[in-house]
Amino acid sequence: MGEVRKLQKKLRQIANLELKVSLTAEEQIKVLKKEELRIRLAELLLQLSGPQQPHCIVGEEDKMKRQIEDETKNHTEHSPAVKIAREDQQQKKKKKDKGLEKEQQKEGGEQTPEPPDPESEFKTLKGLWEKSKFRLRPLEGHSDIITCVASVDNLVISGSRDTTLKVWHVPTATEQRNLGGHRGGVTCLIAPPAEYCRKLASALHVGEKERFVLSGSSDCCVRIWALSSGQCVKSIYTFNAISSICFIAEWEGYIVTGSDAGKLQVWDCRSLENHQSVNAHLDAITTLQSQGPLVFSGSADGGVCVWEVCDGAAEPLRRLHQWGPEVTGCSGVNNAAGGLRLSACGDQVFLASGRSSIRVLNWRTGRVSRLTNHSSTAGVTDCVNQTPGVLIGSSFDLTTGESTLNLFSLPQSRYLVSLSSSDLPRILCFAAWHTPSGGHRWVTGGRNLTVWEQLPDNFKKRGDVTVRRDRRLENSLAESDQDSEEDSDDVADDDDEDEDSSPRDTSDAEDVSGSSWQRCVLQ
């Protein structure tokens, strides 16, 4: 194995060590070597990538394209053959148009609307995101890693390893409440829809307009918090350290929890009684998501299960499909966020497992594709999320320490743009929603908590976020290669080896062949 990949592995290990609560003396020494390893890796990448291509400004690129088109037109417009071909095409088009007009007249003049053009829709969406501007607002108050985030109207709720939840008022970027009560780190939280909050309020005998947030913790408790007062109105002891939670907005509503031992439990929304307990996975259930009458669960072992909600049955969840890590390609998950993360859309489940690509699983057939989320294997994907029509994947560059959000159109999974900002820390959790005016508002968590607020189109000042296009991510959806190089990075190296003494082989050149990709900065 070449020196480049060894350095990438070491940087990956260091990046995960930096998120630990405490470090041993040996681990602290490893962390201190981070900058030295990055410099060495950058030198190797520069040597192996060859001559660098210049940066490309979008405006200049369009100008060059127009010049080329004009020159091509000048060369061909005087050609007799071209003229004849054009005349033939024009005549055929006229005949076709006349035929359509006659058919419309026969049908009483009614015209069938043309179906939307997917390519045109994609170009429009891409153009909107290329022009987007965001303002970033830090929310400071947690003393440890932020593990989960959620939103309710103008409020952001964050859960942290410091055992607390905090409620933030987004318009003023201020802390509104500090919710303390868990005796272990907060691992997950959800905010039920308003209509189910009314049912929950009735069961808990509080005001019908109350909004709630539910939190899970390693202390084996689910706590239900009233946002208006900040009080814990109910606590459910599950006998298992909770690693994930979701809400099923079907029928009367169910709360689903996943444990660090792989147990899945279902709780009635009104009575809060346990209706089902099943050993769903062999390892911790690190992600849960409901989509209509379906529930998706993912495990630290890389496996995924799909469940159907059966209202009125003795056990509300029935397993439809189960796909192991040998199918998903997510074995040996090394995600610093705690394990596998998923986001479902129709038949597709997007999986983030700490690698440079996002796995795309068709949960009906078991077919898996790879969606490139980084321009080299030195990237890390910790979380995936969605807004209507857009998939958002986090990307952390081990070589530079840069964090980025990559946007893809749905359901085509076509690359749109990349959003980044200087000094943006590694993103471990993400939530997205729309403002009343239709703008995007996001919150990202990790070492820091940050609110992303989309600015209006007529906003004259420059935003805090750089919008660019990475050409290496275009046409990035490919069939999954189970033996790809990033999959083999799970094997640990001996950290005591001298990096400079490792022989270089031709695989290094393949690893970094894309290091000279063009980056188009949108201005």
Image: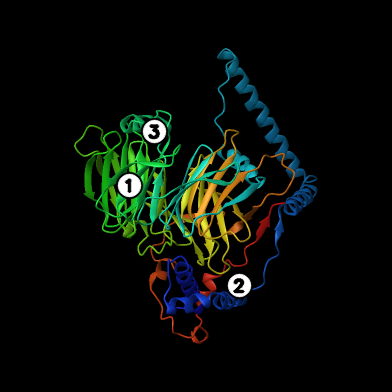
Give amino acid for label 1: Val
Pointer 2 and pointer 3: residues touching (CB < 8 Å)? no
Give amino acid for label 3: Cys
Q: Please report the residue visible at 60 percent of the width from the left and 44 percent of the height from the top.
A: 453
Tell me the distance, in whole angstroms, between the alpha carbons under discs 3 and 1: 16 Å
Q: On the image, numbered disc 1 is attached to which residue?
A: 222
Q: On the image, numbered disc 2 is attached to which residue?
A: 49
Check disc 2: other Cα within 10 Å, few if <14, some if 14-19, many if 20+: some
Q: On the image, numbered disc 3 is attached to which residue?
A: 197
Q: Nearer the viewer, residue 261 or 488?
A: 261
Q: Please report the residue visible at 58 percent of the width from the left and 63 percent of the height from the top.
A: 402
**In the rendered image, which quarter contains the N terminus?**
bottom left
Q: Please report the residue visible at 67 percent of the width from the left and 56 percent of the height from the top.
A: 520
Spot occupied by residue 79 in the image (x, y as percentages of width and height): 78, 46
Q: Is residue 114 rendered to the left or right of residue 10?
A: right
Pointer 3 and pointer 1: residues touching (CB < 8 Å)? no
